[in-house]
Image: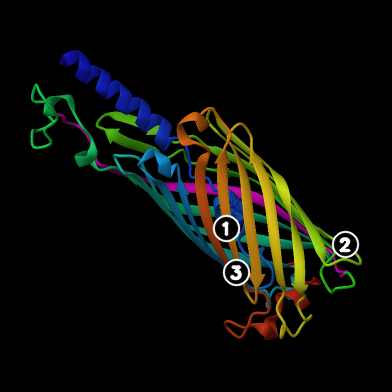
């Protein structure tokens, strides 16, 4: 029994180190802007932006891995800084991730602040900083210990005999990033912007927060490096647009790369400046997470809302166990392009900063 106990502790240590060392990830990473780059704060289209995202992963394993994400971001002081070729962006974000039998839970709340500089009428660059608090916890009651084996079967009423475990740990967290945006000032024959590009790099967990589940054993969180790119190119005389996209993340020995793109079919275009008519389109995306899964997404944009449904089909070695069932996501984005939500239209970001509806 002593040997079994040692093996159990070693396994737990391995699981804790592997699980807590990896951040959350989404297939709809564009709908989690502050989770991939703090510099995205205030760099949306127009004024206020809100994102809500839910992911359920590997349901066929019996223990659903689920993640919820919420963020709000918007530019501030744009009126007072309009003659200084810049403005500030601010954002708040939250996520909650639950994994496995032990209900390993990660809670994060963060505040992002960015400085945005107008390079030209069609280009902006931003520098963002993010600070927040991260808490990790698990439910000891859901773990089976060797001391709870009564010789015949597992008895949860028996004491585990384990000491020195803490059910939660927390620490302050800091991150930083640089963002770039290009937006065309031209539209096609259907009134849709001709092109736009969003790109950036970021580094999360600059402070390498220390987490301690087992007394006297501290584990530093690996820094996460992110590079992202997305764009939109529309046809001159067709109501279609293509959307290439790329995401690369590395954290410790783990890395993730997603490549692919999509197509939009535009039903309506925004009425420029007034916003009385909102852009409407249907979109279809196909992406590939290298050595892991194919990702199919259906998007619907109407009024100020975009709803996205995504499904991951597992292509890795796990496919024999999962039968292709990887993960499901639903994302909702609200974009207040014209500042009507808080009567900000008289401080119009689009007009004041040279731009266009692609901001």
Mark 1 vs mark 3: in front: 1
Res. 78 image quadrant: bottom right
- Residues at circles 3 and 2 in contact by the CB criterion of under 8 Å: no
Residue indicated by mark 1: 309
Where does label 2 land, which residue?
235
Percent position of residue 303, x then y = 65, 77
- Specify start and end residues of the magenta stretch as a single range: 162-187
| Picture quadrant where residue 150 is located | top left
The numbered mark, 1 or 2, whose residue comes first in the sequence reads 2
Residue 40 pos. (x, y %): 63, 57
Q: Secondary structure at mark 1?
A: strand
Residue 190 magenta-drawn?
no
Q: Residues within 10 Å of mark 3 (few under 14, many from 20)?
A: many
Question: Quadrant of the image for the C terminus?
Answer: bottom right
Specify whether 262 is left or right of 23. Answer: right
The residue pinned by badge 3 equals 74
Assign the magenta stretch its main secondary structure.
Answer: strand
Instruction: Give the side of residue 178 with respect to residue 233, left or right.
Output: left
Q: How many marks?
A: 3
Q: Residue at x 17, y 24 (%)?
A: 146
Residue 50: x, y in percent?
Answer: 55, 67
- In the picture shown, does residue 95 fall above or below 293? below
Query: Viewer-nearest of labels 1 and 2?
Result: 1
Distance Cα–Cα, label 1 vs label 2? 25 Å
């Amino acid at each position: 029994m002593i040997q079994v106990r040692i093996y159990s502790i070693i396994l737990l240590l391995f699981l804790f180190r592997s699980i807590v060392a990896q951040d959350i990830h989404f297939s709809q990473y564009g709908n989690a802007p502050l989770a991939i780059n703090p510099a995205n704060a205030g760099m949306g289209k127009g004024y206020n932006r809100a994102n809500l995202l839910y992911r359920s992963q590997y349901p066929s394993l019996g223990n659903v891995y689920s993640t919820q994400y919420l963020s709000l971001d918007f530019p501030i002081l744009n009126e007072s800084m309009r003659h200084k070729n810049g403005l500030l962006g601010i954002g708040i974000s939250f996520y909650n991730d639950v994994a496995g039998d032990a209900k390993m839970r990660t809670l994060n709340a963060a505040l992002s602040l960015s400085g945005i500089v107008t390079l030209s009428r069609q280009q902006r660059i931003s520098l963002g900083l993010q600070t927040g608090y991260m808490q990790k916890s698990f439910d000891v009651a859901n773990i089976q210990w060797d001391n709870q084996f009564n010789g015949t079967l597992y008895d949860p009423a028996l004491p585990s005999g384990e000491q020195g475990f803490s059910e939660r740990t927390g620490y302050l967290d800091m991150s930083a990033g640089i963002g770039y945006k290009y937006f065309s000032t031209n539209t096609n024959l259907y009134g849709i912007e001709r092109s736009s590009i969003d790109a950036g790099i970021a580094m999360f967990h600059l402070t390498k927060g220390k987490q301690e589940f087992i007394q006297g054993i501290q584990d530093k969180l690996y820094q996460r490096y992110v590079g992202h790119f997305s764009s939109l190119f529309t046809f001159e005389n067709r109501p279609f647009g293509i959307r290439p996209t790329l995401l690369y993340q590395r954290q410790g020995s783990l890395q993730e790369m997603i490549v692919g793109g999509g197509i939009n079919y535009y039903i309506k275009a925004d009425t420029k400046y007034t916003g009385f008519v909102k852009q409407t389109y249907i979109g279809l995306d196909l992406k590939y997470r290298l050595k892991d899964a194919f990702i199919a997404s259906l998007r619907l944009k109407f009024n100020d809302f975009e709803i996205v449904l995504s499904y991951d089909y597992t292509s890795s070695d796990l496919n024999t166990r999962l039968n292709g069932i990887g993960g499901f996501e639903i994302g909702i984005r609200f974009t207040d392009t014209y500042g009507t939500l808080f009567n900000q239209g008289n401080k119009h970001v689009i007009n004041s900063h040279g731009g266009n509806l692609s901001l």
